Amino acid sequence: MAIQKIESHVAAQWFAGNSEGSKLVNPTTEEVVATASTDGIDYAAALEFARKEGGAALRKLTFAQRGELLQQMSDALQAERENLIESAIANGGCTRGDAKFDVDGAIGVLAYYARSGSKMGDVRVLPDGDGLKLSRSPRFWGQHVWLPRRGVAVLINAFNFPAWGFAEKAACAILGGMPVVTKPATATALTSYLCTKAIVDAAGLPAGVYSFIGGRPGDMLDHLGPQDLLSFTGSAATGQTLRRTESVIQNSVPVNVEADSLNASVLGSDVEVGSDAWDLFIKEVTREMTQKTGQKCTAVRRIIVPQDRVDDVIEALGEGLDDIQIGNPTLREARMGPLASKAQLRDVKAGLAQLLEDTDVVYGDPEAAIEGPGIEAGKGYFHPKLLLKARDAHGAKYVHNLEVFGPMATICAYGGEAEEASTLVNKGMGGLVASVYTDSNDFAETMMMESSAFHGRLYFGSGKILDHAMGPGLVLPQCVHGGPGRAGGGEELGGMRGVEHFMQRTAIQGARGMVQSITGTRESK
Amino acid sequence: MAIQKIESHVAAQWFAGNSEGSKLVNPTTEEVVATASTDGIDYAAALEFARKEGGAALRKLTFAQRGELLQQMSDALQAERENLIESAIANGGCTRGDAKFDVDGAIGVLAYYARSGSKMGDVRVLPDGDGLKLSRSPRFWGQHVWLPRRGVAVLINAFNFPAWGFAEKAACAILGGMPVVTKPATATALTSYLCTKAIVDAAGLPAGVYSFIGGRPGDMLDHLGPQDLLSFTGSAATGQTLRRTESVIQNSVPVNVEADSLNASVLGSDVEVGSDAWDLFIKEVTREMTQKTGQKCTAVRRIIVPQDRVDDVIEALGEGLDDIQIGNPTLREARMGPLASKAQLRDVKAGLAQLLEDTDVVYGDPEAAIEGPGIEAGKGYFHPKLLLKARDAHGAKYVHNLEVFGPMATICAYGGEAEEASTLVNKGMGGLVASVYTDSNDFAETMMMESSAFHGRLYFGSGKILDHAMGPGLVLPQCVHGGPGRAGGGEELGGMRGVEHFMQRTAIQGARGMVQSITGTRESK
C-alpha cells in the first residue's frame, strides 16, 4: 500500500503541511502507512473562518435542515465504509469486527442525530421546559430557550475511535448549531482523514461547518474565545493540561473532558453459577476485556466478585478468554489484534508492572512470546490477555487508580453485600460506566443509590435480558456518556442532552404575548 | 453598638479564630462594627465532616424532607429579619430598601425551594426525561436519573448580597442533597454570620449540613475532592484563580462562576418619548443604576440608545437620578448609601478614570463633595451618581470591557437597527442579563436571536407590562442566573435546573422491570 499523506481541511480548503510530519504506522507490521503534518496552518484564521462562515450558515438552518446535513455526512461515510474499515485495520490494528464497531458507530450516531433533527422540525429555537408566570398577573412571562453558542467547537479525539470519536461529538455540535474543528489523535488519524475526505467530497456542507486538523494542533487552543467550546476525549493528564490553558480559563470556555475510567463489573451475590445472569456476566466481561484489544474507555478494568465465587469466575473467564484468538487482524480467524501503537504498548507494560505490585496473575503470561495466525515473530505491538487478582481488594494501591489500556482486568473479592461492592466500585473515584449482574432488585437498588454519583451510566445485566442486552461497553446515543472525577467530569450524547452542551440556555422574560411569539411557544387554541 | 466577634461554624461546632482577625467597618461612619478570624480551622476535617455526616444525613431524606429543612431555614431568617436588616445597614451601607432586597430575597429563595421540595414529594430519585427503549425488544430499557453528588458544596459569595448570596446557593445544594460550606466576603460578613447564627440556633439542621467560614478561607480549597463542587460569585479575576486551583483541575471539580457583567439596556427605535415603554425604560434604568449604590451584578452598565433619542434619554434619566437622594442609610430619606468598603471606593474611582478615557460626563460631577442628610463631611465611602456617554460607541476601549461596580452607566448611541444594537450588546463578551425596551416583536426577536448566546437572561420591557414587570435587576428563582464568557460561564437557580448542578446525571440501563422499579418510574396501570 502506498504511503498516504494526510492533509488538513481548514477555511474550506485542503492544506498539506509544510514538513515531512509524523509517521503513522501499521501496528501489526510496523510499516509506515501515512504521514501527517500541520506545519504552517494559521489557526487563528482557521477558527475565525469556522466561527464567521460556518456558524452563520448553521444558525440560518432549522434543526431539521441541520439534521439533513448530518444524514449527508452519515451517507458519505456509508459510501466509503469498506475503505474506512480497511484503514482502521491497517492503521489501528483493529480486527474487522473492531473496525466495524468504530465505523458503523460513526455512521449510526450521525444518522441518529439526523433523525432527532428531523423530529424537531423547521424551528431554530429549542424551548426548555414550560412557560412561567412570573408575577401575580399572568402578563409578565418567562420561557427558557436554547440557542447556539456563537463560537467554534474544537473537538479533540482519542486514538481508539478515529471514526466514531469525531462523529459523536460533531453530530451534537452541528445539530446544536456550532461549527466544528476536529482533531484526531495523530497515531491513528488515517481513518479520521478518510472520513473527512468522504464528508468534504460528498456531504455538501456549507463552508466552515466542518474543519479537520490532521496532526499536531500547534497553538490552536491559544485562540479560543468566550463563545467557543472545547471537547476532549483522552487521558486524564492531557485533560488537565487543557483545563489549565490560559485562553480557556480567561474566557470561561466550557471544557468537556472524557478521560480515565476504571470501569467495574460487579457480580451480585444472588447470581448462581450457570444461571442466565452468570452466562451474561461471563460473556460480556470477556468481550469488554478484549474488544479493541482492551483499548476502549468503557472496557472492564475491575471485576468485583463474591469471595466464594472467585475460583468459578476465574475458570469461566479463562475459558472465555481462551476463545479469543490473537492474530494478524487482516485474517478472519483473528479476534484480537495488536495495541494501536508502540507508545501504547510501552504504557501498557509500564502500567502492568505497577498493577503486579497489587495483584497475582491468574490467567495468561505477561512474558509469553506472542504467537498467532499471521503474526511475524517479534513484529507488531501485540500484548497477551491477562486476568489478575488483587491480593487485598480494599487496600490495593494501583488497581483502583491506574487505567491500563490493554487486554486485562483485575478481580477484586468482596464479602457479598452490595454496600461493600459499592465501596470498591467507588474507589475508582469517578468512571464512565459500572456494570452490575444481578436478578435482585434490592441488590440493584443499593448499587444505584450508592454508586450513581460516581458514574455517568450504570448497566444492570440480568437473566431477563440475556438475549437483548448490549453489554456495558456499547455507548448508545440515547444515553449520556461521561463521568465525574477521574473520568473528567464531562457528559456527551444522551439524545438532546448532548446537543444542549453546544448551546446557551437563556431565560426570556417579558410580556406573555411577546415572549410566546418570539420563542415559538404560543399554545394552540 | 458593641463590636461583634464573628465566629465560624464547622464540624457542628462554633469556632472563634485564634487571632484578632480582620476588621469589618461601617462604610457610612468608618467605625469598626465587627472582627473576623478563621485562624486555626482544620479545613480538611471541616470538609470531611460535612461530607460524611451532612451528606449521609441529607441522602437519607426525601426531597420533601429536604424542603422542610429549607423552610425551617427560611423561618429562622424571618424571625431575625429586623436584626439582619439592621446589620446590613450598619456593615453594608445599605439603605433599608437595599437591605430588605437582600434579606427578603434570602427568605424568599429558601421558601421557594422549600415548596419545590414539597411538590417533589417523598422520593429520593429525580428522573430525567422519559424511559427509553434501547433494543428492538422493549426488554432492554434506559432511564436517566439525578442523584446527589457525594461530596461537599463549597459556596463562596460576594460582598454585595451577604444574605441572599449564600441562601440562593445553599437552597439548591441542600435540596439536591449536598451539604454546604459557605464563605461570605469578609468585608460585609456580619449579616452572613447573623444568618448562620439564626439557622444554627433555630432551624434544626442535621449536623454537617450547613457550615460557615467567617473570614479568610485558608487552605480550604486544597482539600477539594472529585465529588465536591465549588460555586463562586465575585470578580472574574478571582473566578479565574479558583479555576486554576490544582485540586480543582486534578479532580474535575465542577466550578460554577458568576462574575463580571457589563449588563446592557437597549432602547428600541420604535419607542416614542413618553410612551409606556419609554416610562418603564427610564424608571428601571434609573433604579438599576442606583439600587445598592450600583453594587449589583445585574446593574445596568451600558445604555444603548438610538442616536436621535440620546438627548431625551439624558434629560429623562437625569430627572430620575435627581430623585435619588444620597444620604446616611440609617435615615428614611436616604435612597442611596455609600459603597460597601474603602476598597470598593478605590476600585470604583480607578475604574471611572479608565471609563473617562472613552466617555464624557453628561450627568453628575465625579469630583463633587458628597453632601446629604446624615453624612459627616469627609466620612464614609460615598460616590456621586454619574451618567457617561461614549464618544465612539463601537470603538470604546473600556466601556464594553470594564465593570465599574458603582452608581454609574454609559450611554452608547446606535443607528436604530436591532442588529447594530446587538453588536454593541455582544461586545460585553458574555453577561448575566440584557434588557431591551420595545413594543415590537420583530425588534425583540432579532435581539433574542443575535444576543441570547451571550446571556443567561434577556428581559424585554414593553408597555404591556408597565405595571407588572420587575426590572432586569431582580433575580427570580424560577429563571436561570448566570452567563457565558466574562460572566463566568455559570448557571444558578432556574427552578430544578439550579438543583441539578449539585447532582450527578446517570443513565440507568437494564431489564425494563428492574430499571422502572429502582428508579421509581413504573407507569401506573
Image (tube, coloured by chain):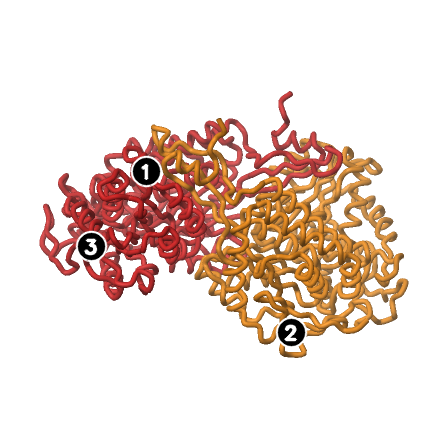
Chain colours: A red, B orange
What residue lies at 39% left-to-right and 46% top-to-bottom?
A: A182
Q: Would you say the residues marked 2 and 3 are in contact, meaning their CB atoms lie under 8 Å apart? A: no
Quarter of image, res B326: bottom right
- In the picture of the structure, the residue carrying the numbered disc 1 is A105
Tell which tag, 2 or 3, sits nearer the viewer: 2
Query: Is there any visible trace of residue B430 in the rendered image?
Result: no
- In the picture of the structure, the residue carrying the numbered disc 2 is B16
* Viewer-side residue, A301 vs A86: A301
Give the class, few, some or many, for how many residues have Cα within 10 Å of label 2's Cα (few <14, many ≥20).
Answer: some
Q: Would you say the residues marked 3 and 1 are in contact, meaning their CB atoms lie under 8 Å apart? A: no
Q: What whole-number distance in Å separates the C-alpha atoms at marks 1 and 2?
A: 60 Å
Query: Is there any visible trace of residue A67 in the rendered image?
Result: yes
Q: Secondary structure at mark 3?
A: strand
Q: Which mark is on residue A386?
A: 3
Q: What whole-number distance in Å separates the C-alpha atoms at marks 2 and 3?
A: 57 Å
Give the class, few, some or many, for how many residues have Cα within 10 Å of label 3's Cα (few <14, many ≥20).
Answer: many
